[in-house]
Amino acid sequence: MTRKQKRLSVIAAGAVFLATATGLTFYALGQKASYFYMPADLQAATLQPGQRIRLGGLVEPGTIVRGQGTEVSFGVTDHEKSVKVTYTGILPDLFREDQGVITEGTFGSDGVFVADSVLAKHDETYMPKEVADGLKAKGVWQEN
């Protein structure tokens, strides 16, 4: 093999390696993607069974029910629609009624959203951007 052929084969091998690494990275990111929805957006959404999503809105007043151990159920609303959520785990300290929340998980066969993580606002002025944008678009939430 000549010097030129060796150089071209190294460049070709590098290009194949980079293409493979890029393809695997995009495949892995596609598997971890979870889409954000407000309760009213779920009617128009076509979700696959077991598809992970993020559900955001406000914790509906009067819906927090604590079960055995760390089980809790509550409603997430955007003041148009409401979705029942169940969660097993420790809730954030600032989780309470009428506050912004984002839950991540899947819908069960009974139509109840089964969350495996719950995120709540962390101070008096913060609201997750997606939740704030969705509530502002509906005219429900205003900044102070």
Image (cartoon, rainbow, N blue to C red):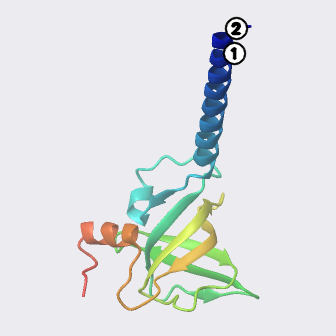
What residue do we see at 45% from left, 50% from top? 45
* Label 2: which secondary element: loop
Q: CA distance from mark 1 to mark 2?
A: 6 Å
Q: Measuring from the top left, give residue 131's x and y in whole percent.
A: 39, 71
Q: Are marks 1 and 2 in contact (CB under 8 Å)?
A: yes
Residue 58 drawn at (x, y percent): 42, 78
Above/below status of 97 relative to 111: below
**Which disc, if any, is residue 52?**
none
Residue at image location 61% in from the left, 80% down from the top: 73
Q: Tell me if residue 5 comes above or below residue 121 in the rendering.
A: above
Residue 124 image position (x, y, % from top left): 38, 91
Q: Quadrant of residue 92?
A: bottom right
Name the residue that disc number 1 marks: 6
Q: Residue furthest top?
A: 1
Q: Secondary structure at mark 1?
A: helix
For residue 12, side relative to residue 140 (left or right): right
Answer left or right for 118 relative to 141: right
**What is the three-letter code of the residue carrying label 1?**
Lys
Out of 120 and 42, give the one closest to the viewer.
Answer: 120
Residue labelled with disc 2? 2
Residue type, numbered disc 2: Thr
Quarter that holds the N terminus: top right
